[in-house]
Amino acid sequence: MPTNYISPISMDALSNLCGELNKNNSIKPNDFARYHVKRGLRNEDGTGVMAGLTRICSVEGYYILDGERVAKEGVLSYRGYDINQIIDNCVKENRFGFEEITWLILFGNLPTQDQLFSLQEVLAECRELPEDFIEDMVMKHASKDIMNKMARCILGLYSYDENPDDISVANVLRQSLQLIAQVPTIMSAAYQVKRRAFDGKTMYLHPIRKDQSTAEYILNQIRPNKEFTDEEAKLLDIMLMLHADHGGGNNSTFSTRVLTSSGTDTYSAIAAGFGSLKGPRHGGANISVAHMMNEIIENVPDPTDENQIKDYLAKILRKEAGDGLGLIYGMGHAVYTVSDPRAIILKNSAQKLAVEAGYEKEFITLQNIEKVSPGLIAEMKGEDNGICANVDLYSGLVYKILGIPEDLYTPLFASARIVGWCAHRLEELTSSKKIIRPAYKSVSKKRKYVAIEKR
Ligand code: COA
């Protein structure tokens, strides 16, 4: 375990510095409206500022009628195919779908059988990391946070690439395919190292198998005994399909596109996606939901009672409980208003499996959070913006049912979203060709420099 670095900056010094910083850094809330700033890149009605065009993915949660935003059921489609249709078809044919979705998202069409085989072969061949990478990059400087370790490993891969800075389509596609295959390997190794360094548990680094789908491969690598059922692997496969992309505007994909637009290398752009996804308002919300759910179960005598849940959620919103940020995790979305199609699919899976797995209380708690939060948030904020359960509300419970540790919730999201990040990077490189550079208005008054002895 790395020894903690003790900062030479004392608490007293820091408190003085913070006072100095706060004195000179506030911006009057009214100024945002005065200068028509699109805070969070949102228009006044909550819709997102149009920042680009994409053929990869469509996320719909409202429509505009007579200039007004009208809420509607959420729709998610990859390259024009509704996610429900893709998943239903894979379930009906009892086959894995993540690789098919990977082809679809990257190349733009559903793959033929031969194309699918060739992609599976390429991914299998690329799962292995460069020689000594695990020893040099993963095992050294262990991190409690797997996302942090993964981001560092992605940046580290730059050093092992003979042609890292070439941003031609062929080179970026090669790097993308390698990364899509390697991210699950990095995730599993980082998790095993964390177990040993921080949890005092045995580390298992199983040999890489090339005959498995991504979902099977992940379960094979993270479980000590490498055992899992086909049903478990197919459920994880659905999770990966649901998380593979979510349009160009989600925070991590947009970050990847912003970095890509500067002409930087693939590893820098993708590492940015990891940094963003880790945040609790984005992919990190799946861990925050788990913490919130546990806290509610510990503190609410009867979580089947909607009123008791409502009272506790009100405390969370008032920042008297939870992590103090006043957010009900797993609720709300920048686009979806009435429903998030991913949450519906995950809720169905969780509902089917929760009782059998002994997690009925957890399921009922989440269901009640989903039921009472929209009204409560509207009541307490004084306006109804249309808030529904998002993908993260039930995803943690599905992982729990699969016996997957909390440490891996957001990393698994990343193992799927890497497909979207790569596709959007390629699209940015081929179609946009303009550096993303919005404006910031300075609200500082001009001042004359004062010599140091006169301050
Ligand atoms: N808990 C508490 N308040 C919430 C909320 C939530 N889950 N979701 C939205 N709100 C609040 C916002 O903070 C905002 O209040 P403000 O005007 O006082 O700042 C207001 O409701 C309007 O929000 P809206 O415009 O609908 O949402 P957004 O686009 O600003 O934020 C999220 C979207 C996802 C960041 C937000 O809903 C959130 O933080 N959710 C919890 C974290 C989460 O689950 N993230 C995963 C997303 S997939």
Image: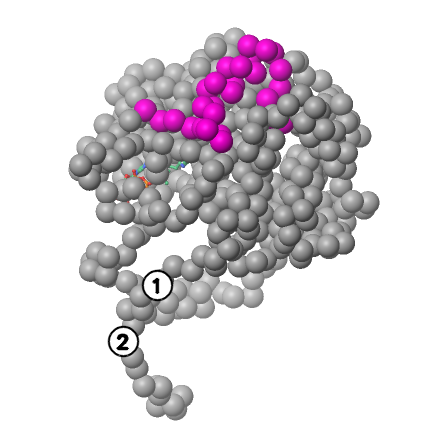
Task: Give the magenta part as a residue range.
Answer: 73-99
Q: Nearer the viewer, residue 384 or 76?
A: 76
The spot of residue 259 in percent (x, y) is 52, 54
- Residue 320 visible from this viewpoint: no
Q: Quadrant of the image for the C terminus?
A: bottom left
Q: As drawn, is 374 to the left or to the right of 261? A: left
What residue appears at the point 74 percent right and 21 percent down from the top-left corner?
A: 225
Q: As drawn, is 4 to the left or to the right of 56? A: right
**Amino acid type assigned to the residue bearing label 1 in the image:** Tyr
Q: Which residue is mark 1?
A: 440
Query: Closer to the camera: disc 2 or disc 1?
Result: 1
The spot of residue 349 in percent (x, y) is 48, 15
2 and 1 marks in contact (CB < 8 Å): no
Which quadrant contains ligand 1?
Answer: top left
What residue appears at the point 73 percent right and 54 percent down from the top-left corner?
A: 163
Q: Which residue is mark 2?
A: 445
Q: Quadrant of residue 401?
A: top right
In the rendered view, tell whether residue 27 sits above or below residue 325: below
Q: Answer whether residue 77 is magenta in the image.
A: yes
In the rendered view, tell whether residue 250 sits above or below residue 356: below
Q: Residue furthest right?
A: 131
Q: As drawn, is 436 to the left or to the right of 40? A: right
